[in-house]
Image (tube, rainbow, N blue to C red):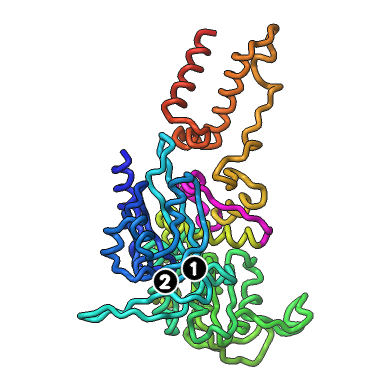
């Protein structure tokens, strides 16, 4: 069973792009310390090839002095998440987090380790040639250190890495981009990433949610108006198209734009010139347009609810962002980022344990990144779910109200054994509910074998039948 779990985990990591170069050193070991999977940055930081890394044991790497200490081995011994600072023989310094996965017998069978380069320290970058591999030192920063959340794109999955490569290429051009994806998948963050990588990075970035603007105000919001041009126009107002001049204009939910305004936007794209409402003077505007939608615009074109000519005008580079449930490695990366942000914001020290990581990976996240972010913030603020201290659940999450125990309504008081058995079953039911009925997770929380949990549940059913 253990070997099967290791193979499945290795296949999962390979499928999600675990082996690709990324901003973190990543590797997976079994409980003997044997390395089952890893990526290029891990190997480079140790001064060995990826092939050598995958043939190694962590114990041997430490013994041979490739790095001084292994938190992964600590995670196996302590059966809990362990973190700290490690340094390698090449002079690389990492913030390392090792998370154990525990089987139904309470034993560690796998440990996943992620390590981020510390700010202002050196990491290795490989330059390949036909006959040799040359290593040179380049600067790197911790991607979670003092970086505004809006400008950071977490890309641990192969899907997001490919999208970022496209965005890097697109950013250097002036072409229009159309982002497709469910609500909450990070379309605005990705747009800001493109803007920050472009030649317009120091110019305005104007973000507009078309679904939030009343139809009667669309034209005034986009084109602006002159003082006295209509009732309530007490002063001159610049429109969004004018404010975005020389910068980037992001139109989110462009599918919600009225048809008449779609025609006016198309005219501006064909001839970049605008005139405020009530004005007599036209002037040139120069902005880069990026649009986003969570709807199928091609079907809207067929139904006549979206202009065909505008659709082809804005759909130069289409980028499809998959939902969070289809890029599981990003769940881990985003959780870590949000945890860092909210711990700093609320002055907390909450961490994720292995049980909570399993829950995060098993959830489908219909609200995508927005839902995950809210979940992590709620967890940090009110310690909802599993408390991180020593990887245990908080006891007050499972408080039992003795006033509602069935036997207290009986005429005769129960014996101590009867009382303890009832309390035990109430507690098991609470834990099962908390774990969404998943007996493996419940057994981990209760600290008992899964077979013991099954027996207790069966015994209680028999007791109920007798009574």
Is residue 228 found left or right of 50 in the rendered image?
right
The image's mark for residue 444 is: none
Q: Are marks 1 and 2 in contact (CB under 8 Å)?
A: yes
Residue count near mark 1 (Cα–Cα under 10 Å), binned few <14, some 14–19, many ≥20: some
In primary-sequence order, the first of circles 1 and 2 is 1
Tag 2 residue:
164
- Look at the image and tell me whether residue 74 can be seen: yes
Relative vertical location of residue 283 with respect to residue 349 in this rendering, above or below:
below
Residue 308 in percent (x, y) is at: 42, 72
Q: Secondary structure at mark 2?
A: helix
The residue where tag 1 is placed is 153
For residue 212, side relative to residue 156 (left or right): right
Residue displayed at 44% across by 37% down = 106
Is 390 inside the magenta-drawn segment? no
In this rendering, the answer to whether 414 lies above or below 370 is above
The residue sitting at 52% across, 70% down in the picture is 152
Q: Which residues are magenta?
A: 345-371
Say which element carries label 1: loop
Question: Horizontally, is 277 left or right of 258 in the view?
Answer: right
Front residue of 331 and 99: 99
Q: CA distance from mark 1 to mark 2?
A: 8 Å
- The residue closer to the viewer here, 145 or 59, is 59
**Location of residue 383 in the rendering, given as x and y in whole percent from the top left corner:** 64, 47
Residue lying furthest left in this view? Answer: 131
Residue 355 within the magenta-colored segment of the rendering: yes
Task: Please say if 466 is above or below 267.
Answer: above
**Residue drawn at (20%, 80%), measured in percent from left and top?**
131
């Amino acid at each position: 069973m253990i070997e099967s779990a290791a193979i499945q985990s290795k296949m999962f990591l390979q499928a999600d792009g675990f082996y690709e170069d990324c901003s973190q050193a990543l590797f997976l070991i079994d409980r003997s310390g044997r390395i089952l999977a890893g990526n290029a940055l891990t190997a480079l930081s140790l001064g060995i090839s990826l092939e050598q890394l995958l043939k190694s044991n962590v114990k041997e790497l430490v013994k041979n002095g490739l790095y001084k200490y292994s938190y992964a081995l600590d995670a196996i011994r302590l059966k809990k998440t362990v973190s700290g600072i490690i340094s390698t023989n090449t002079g690389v310094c990492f913030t390392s987090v090792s998370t154990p996965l525990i089987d139904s017998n309470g034993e560690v069978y796998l440990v996943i380790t992620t390590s981020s380069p510390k700010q202002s320290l050196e990491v290795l970058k490989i330059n390949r040639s036909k006959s040799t591999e040359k290593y040179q030192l380049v600067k790197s920063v911790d991607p979670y250190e003092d970086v505004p959340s809006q400008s950071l794109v977490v890309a641990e999955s192969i899907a997001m890495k490919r999208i970022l490569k496209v965005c890097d290429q697109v950013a250097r051009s002036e072409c229009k981009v159309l982002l497709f994806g469910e609500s909450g998948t990070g379309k605005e963050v990705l747009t800001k990433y493109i803007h920050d990588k472009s030649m317009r990075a120091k110019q305005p970035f104007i973000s507009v949610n078309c679904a939030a603007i009343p139809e009667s105000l669309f034209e005034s919001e986009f084109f602006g108006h002159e003082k006295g041009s209509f009732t309530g126009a007490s002063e001159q107002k610049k429109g969004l198209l004018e404010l975005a001049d020389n910068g980037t204009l992001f139109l989110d939910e462009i599918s919600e734009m009225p048809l008449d305004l779609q025609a006016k936007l198309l005219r501006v794209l064909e001839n970049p010139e605008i005139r405020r409402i009530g004005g007599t003077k036209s002037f040139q505007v120069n902005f880069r347009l990026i649009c986003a939608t969570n709807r199928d615009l091609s079907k809207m074109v067929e139904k006549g609810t979206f202009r065909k000519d505008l659709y082809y005008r804005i759909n130069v580079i289409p980028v499809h962002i998959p939902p969070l449930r289809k890029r599981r490695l990003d769940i881990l990366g985003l959780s870590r980022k949000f945890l860092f942000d909210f711990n700093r914001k609320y002055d907390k020290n909450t961490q994720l344990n292995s049980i909570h990581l399993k829950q995060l990976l098993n959830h489908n996240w219909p609200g995508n990144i927005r839902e995950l972010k809210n979940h992590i913030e709620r967890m940090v603020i009110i310690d909802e779910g599993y408390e991180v201290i020593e990887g245990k659940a908080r006891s007050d999450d499972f408080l039992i109200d003795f006033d509602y125990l069935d036997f207290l309504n009986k005429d005769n008081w129960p014996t101590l054994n009867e009382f303890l058995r009832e309390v035990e079953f109430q507690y098991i039911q609470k834990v099962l509910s908390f774990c969404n009925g998943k007996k493996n997770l419940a057994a981990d929380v209760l600290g008992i074998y899964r077979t013991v949990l099954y027996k207790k549940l069966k015994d209680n059913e028999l007791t109920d039948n007798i009574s």
